[in-house]
Image (spheres, rainbow, N blue to C red):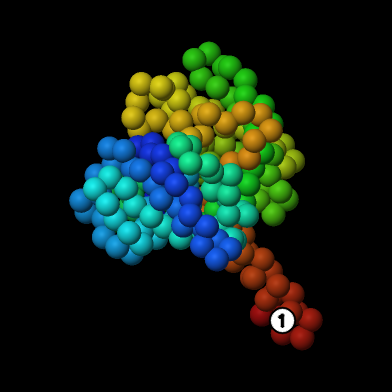
Amino acid sequence: MFTGIIQTVGRVARLEPRGGDVRLHVDTADLDLADVQLGDSIAVCGVCLTAITLETRGFSADVSNETLSLTSLGQLKAGDPVNLEKALRLADRLGGHLVSGHVDGLGKVVSIVPDGRSQRWTFEVSATISRYIAAKGSVCIDGTSLTVNEVAGHRFGVNLIPRRCSEHRSGCDRALCRAAAGQRRSVEAGRCIPQAARLCIRRIRSRRDSRASGNPF
């Protein structure tokens, strides 16, 4: 699990094709990897990846075709910035919201509009994702924890404060902020809403089936 609070911005060192999928090599810049072991999880632009090799300031991970097709990792090129976050420990402060790193799909940047010193971003997602986006709920975009301002159909808006995109912060969310209208970014809906929805649907179906069989309970 992660928090959606970016710890640093690394770079794609290289992409190595491996039998149809890809091995991603990441330069982690100033991210401290002293407490990371082989097999640990690191979120790269919001995608939970398993470290299979570790270096002084970098690691590599295998990325499946499923992940490449459903996330912004499929758009990466050597030299691109990537938002990085190490896995959450139970004793850590939860500054954002609980993020699984299991991206739901891609969202298209519809517009970016200045709002004071901040920016209002509008995204468009598929119906399977939009059903789990709620106003004032949480959403994770390219690994960044954000609050949903409003929802209209399959579109939703978020606000990026100046700190999110400051060019003077090593831990800023530049991998997201360099996006432009028309580009696509990884989107993970807040985990609580999908789980609650599934439980409600299961409960409703169970009651319907019970009544159909003549059981009032």
Describe residue 98's horizontal placement relative to residue 19 as left or right. left
Q: Is residue 211 above or below residue 65?
A: below
Describe residue 189's horizontal placement relative to residue 201 as left or right. left
Q: In this view of the protein, can residue 210 be seen by the observer?
A: yes
Horizontal and vertical percent for residue 54?
Answer: 29, 55
Horizontal and vertical percent for residue 135?
Answer: 60, 39
Horizontal and vertical percent for residue 68?
Answer: 58, 54
How crowded pointer 1 is (Cα within 10 Å; few <14, some 14-19, many 20+) is rated as: few
Q: In this view of the protein, can residue 97 be seen by the observer?
A: no
Residue shown at 55% from the left, 22% from the top = 119
Residue named by callout 1: 210
Residue shown at 58% from the left, 17% from the top = 114
At mark 1, the secondary structure is: helix
Q: Quadrant of residue 153?
A: top right
> Furthest-top residue in view?
116
Which amino acid, by three-letter code, is at mark 1?
Ser
Residue shown at 57% from the left, 37% from the top = 148
